[in-house]
């Protein structure tokens, strides 16, 4: 069974802090991972993709992938109240579909 | 540029009715996907098209669900004899990649259709 697991949260952080979101996956086959942000009542919005071990930075966002330990994480620096949303982790398991976790709800308070 | 669009945005159906949900992918995107998202859950894969060919329909929950993409652009997801358990948000996504090996790469989602079956 191919799975992606996330803590549902909520994860509460103060404005300006670093938010750390984590995701584990069950099968070493998966090659590519994606982080989506989903505001309440809206559709998922792609914010980061990562394909190889290590870190990938894009503005305030850093994705980290560790294939040996089968986890992927997303760091959000200088968190803002507008970052409050559900963050979905997804892996593709080298197939034609994305397997999503249940999402972690992030709350950034002023 | 234009993103993925879906219609209707909201649909209320009485149990037993048939419904049709439409997706317009990003222009030029080869791959099109349908996902179902229940409240508080992540999206779950339903089916995948590469151009007009339906290459994977392993996620369709029953034979009441049918999808097509006859000309390789617009797609329709049809649900026959709707049941209350069909109530969910139906998301369409598209991707510019066409290869199956090595995954599909980035997928871009439309706004979804919220289906409520009474």
Image (spheres, coloured by chain):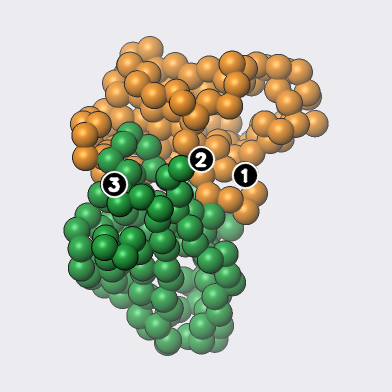
Where is the C terminus of chain B found, in terms of image quarters?
top right
Residues at marks 3 and 2 on the same chain: no
Horizontally, is A73 left or right of B9 in the view?
left
The answer to whether residue A96 is above or below residue B83 is below
Residue at 26% x, 44% y is B105
Residues at marks 3 and 1 on the same chain: no
Tell me the residue that label 3 is attached to. Answer: A29
Q: Position of residue A20 (x, y in %)?
A: 41, 76
Residue at 46% x, 26% y is B58
Residues at marks 1 and 2 on the same chain: yes
Q: Residue furthest top?
A: B70
Horizontally, is A41 left or right of B14 in the view?
left
Q: Position of residue A103 (x, y in %)?
A: 51, 59
- Chain A, which colour? green
Where is the N terminus of chain B found, in terms of image quarters?
top left
Q: Nearer the viewer, mark 3 or mark 1?
A: 3
Q: Position of residue B100 (x, y in %)?
A: 25, 31
- Chain B, which colour? orange
Query: What kind of element bears circle 1?
Result: loop
Q: Chain of mark 3?
A: A
């Amino acid at each position: 069974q191919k799975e992606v697991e996330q803590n549902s949260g909520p994860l509460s952080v103060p404005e300006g802090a670093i938010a750390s979101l984590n995701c584990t996956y069950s099968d070493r086959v998966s090659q590519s991972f994606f982080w989506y942000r989903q505001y309440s009542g809206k559709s998922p919005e792609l914010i980061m993709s990562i394909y190889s071990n290590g870190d990938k930075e894009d503005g305030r966002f850093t994705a980290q992938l560790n294939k040996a330990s089968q986890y992927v994480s997303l760091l959000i620096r200088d968190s803002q109240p507008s970052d409050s949303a559900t963050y979905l982790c997804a892996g593709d398991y080298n197939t034609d579909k994305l397997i999503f976790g249940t999402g972690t709800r992030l709350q950034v308070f002023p | 540029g234009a993103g993925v669009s879906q219609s209707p945005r909201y649909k209320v159906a009485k149990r037993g009715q048939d419904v049709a949900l439409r997706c317009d992918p990003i222009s030029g995107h080869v791959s099109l996907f349908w996902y179902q998202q229940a409240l508080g859950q992540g999206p779950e894969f339903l089916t995948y098209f590469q151009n007009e060919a339906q290459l994977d329909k392993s996620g369709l929950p029953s034979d009441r669900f049918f999808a097509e993409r006859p000309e390789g652009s617009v797609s329709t997801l049809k649900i026959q004899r709707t049941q209350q358990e069909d109530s969910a948000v139906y998301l369409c996504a598209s991707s510019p990649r066409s290869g199956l090996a090595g995954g599909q790469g980035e997928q871009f989602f439309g706004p979804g259709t919220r289906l409520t079956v009474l």
